[in-house]
Image (cartoon, rainbow, N blue to C red):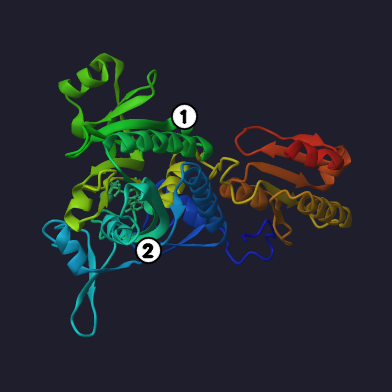
Amino acid sequence: MMHLYMRQSQLFTKTKREDPKDEVSKNAKLLLRAGFVHKEMAGVYSYLPLGLKTLRKIEQIIREEMNAIGGQEITLTALQEKELWDKTNRWDDAVVDNWFKTKLKNDTELGLGFTHEEPMTRLMKEHVSSYRDLPKSLYQFQTKFRNETRAKSGIMRTREFIMKDLYSFCRDQAEHDAFYEKAKQAYVNIFNRVGLGDLTYLTFASGGVFSKYSHEFQTLTEAGEDIIYVSAEKKIAINKEVYNDEVLANLGVSKDELTERKAVEVGNIFTLGTRFSDALELTYADESDAQQSVFMGSYGIGPARVMGTIVEALSDEKGIIWPESVAPFRVHLLALGESEQVKKESEQLYSDLVLAGVEVIFDDRAGLSAGEKFADADLLGMPYRVVVSERSLEAGGAEMKKRADSGKGEIIALASVIDLIK
Ligand code: ATP
Ligand code: MG
């Protein structure tokens, strides 16, 4: 269970005024300055208390949406054996160039999984034999390792990252298509819930052998590495990699309805067909007892990439602006000045908020100026800032302001803070 409330005087992380010298991306600069993450090396980040809270909230939203479409949560291993991946021709570095590989003491080769179609398919061989066993979908939040060449996008593209990957197993294409539509809607829900709905487009991308297109979820941001062609009106986009006259005709859109934009792929859903079930012999007996290949799909999202994208898309010059659904805490309560009255009233408000079940971080640190506390609150980006100072008490209570609103806050009675926030 994550902390629902916290005293900033106890938090071990400190904020930094200066941007880190070795980062170019906005998300890395802000998240490092705010103490949400720690950089271990290029493209490798650890998550600290505040960052972990946000990451877990994003994961929980994804989990709820995956459960709602029937997904069953499991977790597979990072260590992978060569023989399995040889069968699908995905072991060779000439085919897959981002493997991290290692060896047992006896020289047996192993890899650190960059994705999990192979072990998922092999796992299902033990559990699927008849048409009655299908359809099924399995998912995990699991660490992937990818030897990415570029590592300039902060937590949006790292060499070790958690991915939510779901795999669906259906009897045939029709059953798959129905599940695929449900998954697509679940993804729309996820991006709405994490606060990226307005900026995120269902994007047509290359499909492979079993379907014309795959679908990416692309969020508009200058920090993105992809180019997409967007119809804001139809709320769809086309990835540059498949942007041509045939695709336009298929989708019934014309060039002049589309604008070229930079975007980041936050999620992706893909029809795999029988590529993996054929290679690994995952079959089931149909109603007439004939063996059929299981029809598969895969559905990925990187929670950290989503988190980095939120920072890129929603921050301002002062810091991060978390949507309420993923903010580490809902309220940042600030006590300003050292007066006994401020101390008493802010402590009381803190315990009232805690008792009311409002997630709150309390800046109870001594010896800091108001300016320093305000700057930290803006940097950390909780949705509501509530200030208790001598001035606010004289004016009638606490000063409350939403992080997303510019300008000054308003004074509200201490007794009505909780109602206004809840
Ligand atoms: P990209 O083209 O950006 O490299 P990808 O096609 O390799 O992405 P997938 O293999 O489909 O991505 O992975 C599923 C999801 O995992 C992506 O949509 C993204 O959200 C996330 N993801 C992929 N690579 C990374 C990474 N290096 N760091 C963090 N998240 C990642
Ligand atoms: Mg990639």
Earlier residue among tags 2 and 1:
2
Secondary structure of the residue carrying numbered label 2: loop
- The residue at which mark 1 appears reads as 198
Q: Quick one: label 1, few (<14), some, or many (20+) residues within 10 Å? A: few
Q: In which quarter of the image is residue 88?
A: bottom left
The CA span between labels 2 and 1 is 34 Å
* Residue 221, visible in the rendered structure: no
Residue 112: image location, x then y, percent? 28, 66
Q: Quick one: label 2, few (<14), some, or many (20+) residues within 10 Å? A: some
Viewer-proximal residue among 178 and 251: 178
Residue that extends furthest to the front in the rendered view of this protein? 288
* Residue 184, visible in the rendered structure: yes
- The residue at which mark 2 appears reads as 76
- Residue drawn at (41%, 35%), measured in percent from left and top? 182
Viewer-proximal residue among 67 and 367: 67
- Residue drawn at (77%, 40%), measured in percent from left and top? 399
Residue 235: image location, x then y, percent? 39, 23
